[in-house]
Image (cartoon, rainbow, N blue to C red):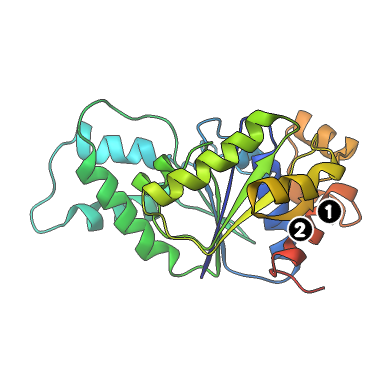
């Protein structure tokens, strides 16, 4: 099982990159795949054609609050991990033809959340073992990811835009990953739609992380996103998708 995490500043194209990575893996015949939307903006679902409410599913946060806060305590003889795992399977997991989907959501409460967080992480570690690939669309920082979802991943993809703040974000994200003892194999740089291609080698030299390439800006992708259409339905000849395929090849995930 491989876990891939996309991070970056807001507006760099994290969700669309994650969706197009999923399309690459689906077309390459990789299965099963789990997509996890950990970004508070919750854009990934729409970009892969998922409507959780229509499917009668809840976010992980909603299930955590309902299970441990509103109903309180635990059931006799059932551990917190087993309790939330059963809820995630029944009420939080969207099962599709080519991938499954979960959303972290934003409904958190104040106060100590150690037990629910630990239970959620343990449940997800068990559930994700059944997948070949787990793709996580993460918020800007990695503390949230490490605390609530996963402390061990394979590859982290930092999305860059054309600003110094973006480079600073990459430095900070790497530092935080080390500080919170997150285990990972590779920390990659990927240029977003607005990132100038000629700055790739400079970013790699400055940050000392491997630069895999950039996503090509594409009007068809813009139109799909604007109209709430699934990026998985883009034609395979789409230029943005082709650029993501090149990035996935550079990372060693596809070979065609």
Marks 1 and 2 sit apart, C-alpha to C-alpha, by 6 Å
Q: Position of residue 155 (x, y in %)?
A: 57, 59
Instruction: Give the farthest residue toward the left.
Output: 76
Secondary element type, mark 2? helix
Q: Position of residue 236 (x, y in %)?
A: 87, 57
Residue, disc 2: 247
Q: Is residue 77 above or below residue 51?
A: below
Label 1 sits on residue = 243
User: Viewer-proximal residue, 144 or 82?
Assistant: 144
Image position of 226 (left or right of 198): left
User: What kind of element bears circle 1?
Assistant: helix
Instruction: For the residues labelled 1 and 2, say whether their Cβ atoms are less than 8 Å apart.
Output: yes
Horizontal relation, residue 205 to residue 198: left or right: left
Q: Is residue 237 above or below residue 115?
A: below
Horizontally, residue 246 falls left or right of residue 183, namely right
* Residue 64, horizontal then vertical, whole percent: 30, 40
The residue carrying pointer 2 sits among few (fewer than 14), some (14 to 19) or many (20 or more) residues within 10 Å by Cα, namely many
Q: Which mark is residue 1?
A: none
Residue at the location (76% across, 58% down)? 247
Residue count near mark 1 (Cα–Cα under 10 Å), binned few <14, some 14–19, many ≥20 = some
Vertical position of residue 246 compared to residue 173: above or below? below
Front-most of residues 128 and 86: 128
**Image coords of residue 164 (percent x, y):** 68, 30
Vertical comparison of 60 with 97: above or below: above
Q: Which residue corresponds to the image point at 78% horizontal and 54% vertical from the top-left?
A: 244
Q: Is residue 222 visible?
A: yes
Query: Which residue is nearer to you in this view: 144 or 33?
Result: 144
The structure residue drawn at horizontal position 67% and vertical position 43%, both measured from the top left corner, is: 159
Tell me if I can see residue 49 in this picture.
no
Residue closest to the far front: 206
* Residue 245 placement: quadrant: bottom right
């Amino acid at each position: 099982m491989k876990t891939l995490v996309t991070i970056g500043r807001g507006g760099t194209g994290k969700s669309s990159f994650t969706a197009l990575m999923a399309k690459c893996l689906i077309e390459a015949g990789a299965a099963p795949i789990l997509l996890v939307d950990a970004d508070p903006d919750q854009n990934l679902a729409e970009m892969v054609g998922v409507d959780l409410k229509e499917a009668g599913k809840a976010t992980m946060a909603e299930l955590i609050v309902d299970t441990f806060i509103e109903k309180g305590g635990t059931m006799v003889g059932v551990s917190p991990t087993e309790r939330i795992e059963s809820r995630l399977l029944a009420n939080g997991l969207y099962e599709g033809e080519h991938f499954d989907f979960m959303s972290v959501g934003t409904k958190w409460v104040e106060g100590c959340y150690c037990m629910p967080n630990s239970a959620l992480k343990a449940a997800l570690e068990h559930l994700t073992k059944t997948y070949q690939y787990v793709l996580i669309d993460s918020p800007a920082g990695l503390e949230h990811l490490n605390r609530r979802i996963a402390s061990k991943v394979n590859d982290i993809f930092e999305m860059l835009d054309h600003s110094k703040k973006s480079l600073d974000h990459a430095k900070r994200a790497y530092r935080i990953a080390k500080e919170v003892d997150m285990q990972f194999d590779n920390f990659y740089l990927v240029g977003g739609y607005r990132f100038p291609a000629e700055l790739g080698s400079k970013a790699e030299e400055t940050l000392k992380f491997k630069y895999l390439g950039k996503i090509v800006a594409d009007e068809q992708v813009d139109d799909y996103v604007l109209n709430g259409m699934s990026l998985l339905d883009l034609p395979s000849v789409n230029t943005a998708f082709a650029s993501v395929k090149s990035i996935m090849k550079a990372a060693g995930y596809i070979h065609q």
